[in-house]
Image (cartoon, helix red, strand yellow):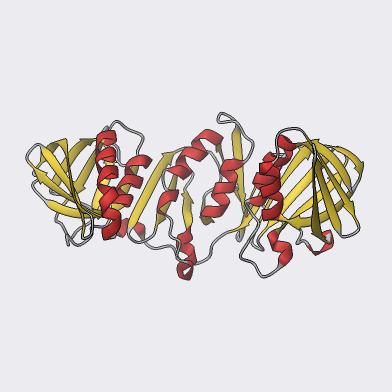
Amino acid sequence: MKATLTRKDLANALSIAASASSQRSSHPVLQSIKLEAAGATLNLTGCDGEMWAYATAAANIETPGAVCVQQRLLSEIVNALSDGMVDLELEGTVVYLRANQSEWKLLALPAEEFPPIAEVAQESQLTMPMGDFRAAVDSVAFAVSDDMSRAYLTGVLFSYDGQVLTMVATDTHRLAVNRMHREGIGSPLTAIVPEKALRTIKQLPVAEDEGITVCFDSTRLMVDVGSAKMVAQLLTGTYPNWERVVPQEFTRMWTIDRTELYENVKRAMILARDNANRVRFSGQGDRVVISARSEDRGEAKEEVAIISKNGEVEIAFNGRYVMDALQSLPTDGIVAEMTEPSRPAVFRPSDGGEDRFCVVMPMALG
């Protein structure tokens, strides 16, 4: 194998392929990137055993062939190089990478050991502009869990009934929901998509206004945009009945400027980090007093103006969860709906609508 291409094209393709490789796997080939030189392209593939990411880069192929090299090392080298041409050449069990005055010798594995990309039967699908897909994922993905003992919570629930696409994520301490009214964008489906796969789909080289189609079968999903492709296992398990978590009524309400509240909480978090991220919110007439304390470093107090409806209440939240919720709501103002200090609060855009919101569980006042 011998190929020559620009560092930029190699880096772009490598970033997509690398998103699927695993540094935790005990199998060296799953920590690798498969390089395949054929025709006029260098094809790169990463795999962690459950997900594959594939991307192509235009290249001058002098000698076709395929080989696997360690992903982390290859990525570090390519990202550290200055722009220009890169030569990749396989000699025996070694791949030489040459660029400008640099030369690297990378140990290689046989390409035959790399698992082939799984097939997807394409039983159902969803199609929408890439910009809408990215925004929808960003509106909920922050709330996925990292608890692998409940793997089904490490992904986003997709549910489409032919008219409304509902996306849900939760780590049991908070819940994010986004409903999109889109008739005829695909087939009815329910699937739990790994957050890792969604990050890779967002990376694919597709313009914001171009359509993207996500295909599903009973166990996998697939996105193919020509120059790049992603296949991933769907998560198994029974997703919690998230609608039971959403309060059906509230007795207290604050309407607040979103940016001002975010900046106030961000400053309070300087000390709250020492106290499990606990930030106290005290509704006092037309303002909320935001406070945090650290046993070793002191106390912080901020104030923000509100429009209050029976909002005399003191409640504590994980400040990072509140900041994440605020960032996910693209509106100038937000509404916080509450009942009592021990009950969850709902954060919504102030311009109305029931389709996008975050539920945050309270903390003990401490």
228 left or right of 366?
right
The answer to whether one can see residue 129 in this image is no
- Observer-nearest of 352 and 60: 60
Q: Position of residue 342 (x, y in %)?
A: 17, 60
183 left or right of 67?
left
Q: Position of residue 151 (x, y in %)?
A: 49, 65
* Residue projecting furthest to the front: 101
Give the residue drawn at x 75%, y 62%.
115
235 left or right of 85?
left
| The image quarter in which residue 347 lies | top left
Give the residue drawn at x 28%, y 49%.
269
346 left or right of 27?
left
Q: Position of residue 243 (x, y in %)?
A: 33, 56
- Observer-nearest of 311 and 353: 311
Would you place residue 75 above or below residue 12 in this image? below
Which corner quadrant holds the C terminus? bottom left
Give the residue drawn at x 21%, y 36%.
256
Give the residue drawn at x 88%, y 52%.
90
- Observer-nearest of 248 and 337: 337
Would you place residue 25 above or below residue 120 in this image? below
* Residue projecting furthest to the top: 209
